[in-house]
Amino acid sequence: MIGSAEEYIERLRSYKREIYVLGKKIDNFADHPNIRPTVNAFAYTYELAKTRDEFAPYSDLVGEKVNRLNYVNKTPEDLMARFDYQRELSKRMATCNYRCTGCDAINAIYPATKALDEREGTDYHQRFLKLLKEIQKNDYACTAALTDVKGDRSKRPAEQRDMFLHVVEKREDGIVVSGAKVHQSGAFAADVNFVLPTQTFKQGEEEFAIVFAVMPEDEGVKYIIQNTGVQAKQREDGEFEPGNVKYGDRTTCMVVFDNVFIPWERVFIFEDLKAARDVLNYFAASHRCAGAACKAGFIDSMAGAASLMLKANGLENVAVLQQKIAEMVAVSEGAYGISIGAAAKGYKANDSWQPNQFMANAGKIIGVEGFTKSLVNLIDIAGGIIGTSPSEFDMKGELGEKVSKYMSASEKFTPEQRMKIVKFIEFWATSSHLIGAVHGGGSPAASLITLRFIMDIEDKEKAVKNCLDL
Ligand SMILES: Cc1cc2nc3c(=O)[nH]c(=O)nc-3n(C[C@H](O)[C@H](O)[C@H](O)COP(=O)(O)OP(=O)(O)OC[C@H]3O[C@@H](n4cnc5c(N)ncnc54)[C@H](O)[C@@H]3O)c2cc1C
């Protein structure tokens, strides 16, 4: 079904979650100022799904239309529609849509468990399909947790078990897991959180090679909300001071698994090194490619903000500044083009359609460069005020008249309107977005490692040798 924002929020309110902000457990988490914007962002995915047919495809699995982000892609067109949805969400919200990692997990677990069952004669795929049906029928919002805390990066997991999520007990009815995941986007406000490995493992490290789903009823799961500058501003209760009041900073959390019991029906890979590698490879390509489409949407938002700022400053006729906006548009279309190319040039894998691996990883590298360039252009266009401005509260406070007078620029904009644009651009420059662009889906270094591993440089050398008669 295509659910509604209201149904999602109502469900969320019924969940009894252990969520911590600034060291204290919070009540009514859905209305907390650090969480409400994330809830709004999830909610908007439900609204946008209703606006275009391709965002609500028909699923054979349940015999009805489902959200694009809960769908297993079967064709290049499916993947392209997913990237369109992704770009549109990023552009309209200027923040994470949070359901994208869930979509990547669904599209990674599906082919990986199919191959695992064919190899081992197990029933993991059927278990997964049972949950997927439930997800599609109820339009659950899903996220995915991969990144372990990892401790000393030079040590193997077995040398520091607690730094990697692992099995502590195998029971007849399920498994008990322990460990912690970091940087988890929106996990605290999702219905289902898929848990995948953070890396591949060697023989002897099987206890880490697991994939499962966490549901709201699971006990012992603790969420600690990130605290950065924008989070602090969100608690100040301003009307526009945090810059993106409606959808907020892309908010992550640390998730602690304190001996959490997971029933077998929600365990999809258990101590299998090959299947863990497969699921990770599918996830990484899918997420890096979706990230390129997402960055396109973010850059669209930055270009819009840049153009408004030019007008608010009375600079809209300055050619060199307009040209910088054109550069941002070029970068956005380039990143989007990579994701669409990766969808078109993708491949079939166990009844799913996966993006082209080269282009997906290139999307990460080019996307980060493009995002950085666009952010610098935006800062250049906006002026220093986005890093130095007084607050909304000053504008409304004892010196309000003076602050408003000196914050005014073009007559076409009130001082408050200009200040809103300033705060929005300050948000782009100082929120978690740049860091998320660099590290979300793995660092650029991780993409380069993948590219170095899969690239056919001999073929390129051969072309040069032929050219030079070497
Ligand atoms: C805003 C944001 C949102 C995120 N959302 C999610 C999410 O929803 N779900 C999720 O699972 N993850 C999420 N991530 C995590 C993201 O995938 C990781 O940040 C990324 O994979 C890098 O891992 P790390 O932060 O632990 O960096 P580190 O492991 O500390 O790495 C730092 C650098 O060192 C390199 N490095 C690390 N270890 C080694 C080694 N042994 N040998 C050589 N080089 C090494 C890395 O490539 C990187 O360049 C998010 C991150 C951010 C910033």
Image (cartoon, rainbow, N blue to C red):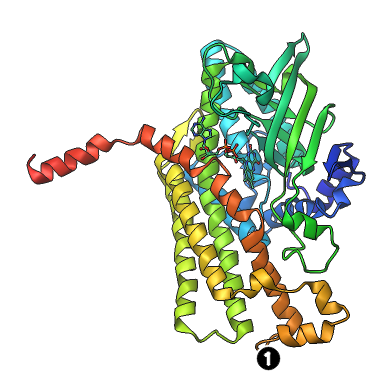
Badge 1 element: loop
**Position of residue 71 measured from the top left corner of the image (x, y, whole percent):** 62, 40
Q: Residue furthest right?
A: 27
Q: Can residue 1 be seen by looking at this rendering?
A: yes
**Position of residue 144 measured from the top left corner of the image (x, y, whole percent):** 66, 36
The kind of residue on which mark 1 rests is Glu
Query: Toward which corner of the image does residue 245 lie, by quadrant?
Result: bottom right
| Left or right: where 257 falls relative to 468 | right
Residue at 59% in and 71% down? 304
Q: How many marks?
A: 1
Query: Toward which corner of the image does residue 375 lie, by quadrant?
Result: bottom right
Mark 1 Cα shell of 10 Å, populated few (<14), some (14-19), many (≥20): few
Is the residue 148 above or below the residue 143 in the image? above
| Left or right: where 207 falls relative to 328 | right
Q: Can residue 271 be seen by looking at this rendering?
A: no
Residue at 75% in and 12% down? 169
| Quadrant containing the N terminus in the rendered view | top right
Q: Which image quarter has ligand 1?
A: top right
Beta carbon at label 1 within 8 Å of ligand 1: no
**Position of residue 466 measured from the top left corner of the image (x, y, whole percent):** 11, 41
Is the residue 24 above or below the residue 270 in the image? below
| Left or right: where 19 falls relative to 272 | right
Q: Which residue is mark 1?
A: 411
